[in-house]
Amino acid sequence: MPTPNLFLIYVTDVEASTAFYRDLFDMEPDMVTPRYVPFTVAQGVLFALWSGGAESVAAATARTSEVGLMVPGSAEAVDAVYDEWTAKGVTVIDEPHDAVFGRTFVVADPDGNLTRVSPVD
C-alpha cells in the first residue's frame, strides 16, 4: 500500500511563503512556479506550497492541522529552535511548554498555517 508523499500548504502569496519556509527550515525549493513550490524533505517526499486554492485561504479560517518538526535531543534542543526562529521574527502562537509528549511550541506562517516543534517520538 502506498504511503503519503506530498504535503500541501495552502498559501496566498507564494513568493512570501517561499521566503518564509526557505528561511525557517534553511532549505531550498526544488523549483519555483507562480502557484506551486515543492521542497524535498526526504527521498520521494515533498512539502509544497500551493496557491491554487488561495481563494479558500482566509485569516479567519480555523487551522485544523499542523506541520510538525521533531528535533532530536532534550527540551533544550526544542528551546534552541524556538530561540533561533523568534530571532527571525516568526509569529509565535504557543510559547514553549511541557506537554505529555515533551517540550513543544507552535508558530504560524504568513497565512496562519501552523508549525509545531517537538522532540522526536
Image: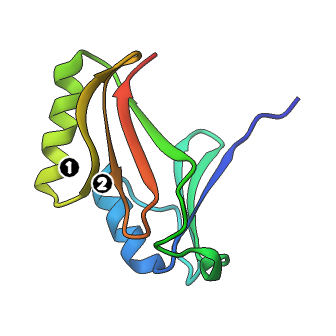
Q: Position of residue 29 (x, y in %)?
A: 46, 62
Could you tell me if the residues under marks 2 and 1 are in contact, i.e. CB atoms within 8 Å? yes
Please rate how many residues cluster around mark 2, counting C-alpha atoms within 10 Å: few if below 14, some from 14 to 19, many from 20. Answer: some
Numbered circle sitting on residue 75: none
Residue 16 seen in this snapshot: yes
Numbered circle sitting on residue 24: 2
Q: Which residue is mark 1?
A: 85
Provide the secondary structure element on which disc 2 rests. Answer: helix
Three-letter amino acid code at the position of disc 1: Trp
Placement of 86 over or under 89, stated as above or below: above
Count of numbered circles on the image: 2
Query: Could you tell which of marks 2 and 1 lies nearer the N-terminus?
Result: 2
> At 60% from the left edge and 50% from the top edge, which residue is drawn?
46
> At 64% from the left edge and 76% from the top edge, which residue is drawn?
56
Q: Position of residue 58 (x, y in %)?
A: 52, 76
Specify whether 30 is left or right of 46: left
Residue closest to the eye, 15 or 87: 87
Provide the secondary structure element on which disc 1 rests. Answer: helix
The quarter of the image holding the N terminus is: top right
Please rate how many residues cluster around mark 1, counting C-alpha atoms within 10 Å: few if below 14, some from 14 to 19, many from 20. Answer: some
Q: Position of residue 104 (x, y in %)?
A: 31, 30
> At 28% from the left edge and 59% from the top edge, which residue is drawn?
23
Q: Name the image quarter holding residue 118.
A: top left
Q: Name the image quarter holding residue 108.
A: bottom left
Q: Position of residue 50 (x, y in %)?
A: 60, 70
Q: How is the image coloured?
A: rainbow
Specify whether 46 is left or right of 15: right
